[in-house]
Amino acid sequence: MTFASRMATTATRLSTTYGTSISVSRTTSSAYDTATGSVTESSTSYTGAGNPDTFNFQEKDNVNVLSTDIKLLFKSGTAPLVGDSVSINSVVYRVLNVGIAVVQNTDILYTLQLRK
């Protein structure tokens, strides 16, 4: 077992033990119909575990990071993307920014900036 896999296992264990279940959905455009002018969209969902928190005083600038934004430390087998929808306790947020903790080319943990 490599160092990166041990770190990923630890992050998963801590997230599932002390975090909350998080649902994420992603809508993608798959095809454009030139005859109708419509776009076919498909939606995929995945789950993970995480710990919602607030941004600290130094991180809030009221331009890029608002006082109402949520910082989510998130662990999932699927990498979240900007624009995904995240549901925490039945409240839906949009992902504005994704930070990735990487060890030996392995994603360990994601830090998400969420906004209603």
Image: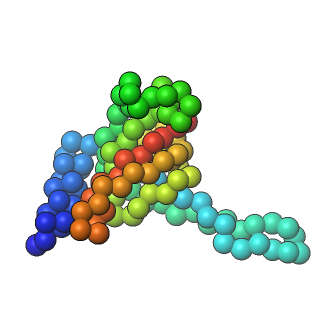
Identity of the residue furthest to the left in this view: 1
Vertical position of residue 50 compared to residue 44: above or below: above
Tag count = 0
Question: Can residue 25 be seen here?
Answer: no
The type of colouring in the image is rainbow
At which x and y percent is residue 13? 18, 53
Instruction: Classify residue 24 as left or right of residue 104.
Output: right
Instruction: Classify residue 5 as left or right of residue 32.
Output: left
Q: Which residue is drawn at 75% across and 67% down?
A: 39
Q: Which residue is drawn at 49% across and 57% down?
A: 81
At which x and y percent is residue 29? 66, 66
Q: Residue at x 81, y 66 (%)?
A: 38
Position of the N terminus by quadrant: bottom left
Position of the C terminus by quadrant: top right
Instruction: Classify residue 90 as left or right of residue 28.
Output: left
At which x and y percent is residue 20? 31, 43
Which of 50 and 101 lies nearest the eye of the viewer? Answer: 101
Question: Can residue 29 be seen here?
Answer: yes
Instruction: Please tell me in which quadrant of the rendered image residue 63 appears.
Output: top right
Q: Which residue is drawn at 49% across and 28% down?
A: 61
At which x and y percent is residue 15? 24, 48
Vertical position of residue 1 compared to residue 91: above or below: below
Vertical position of residue 33 compared to residue 86: above or below: below
Vertical position of residue 4 compared to residue 81: above or below: below
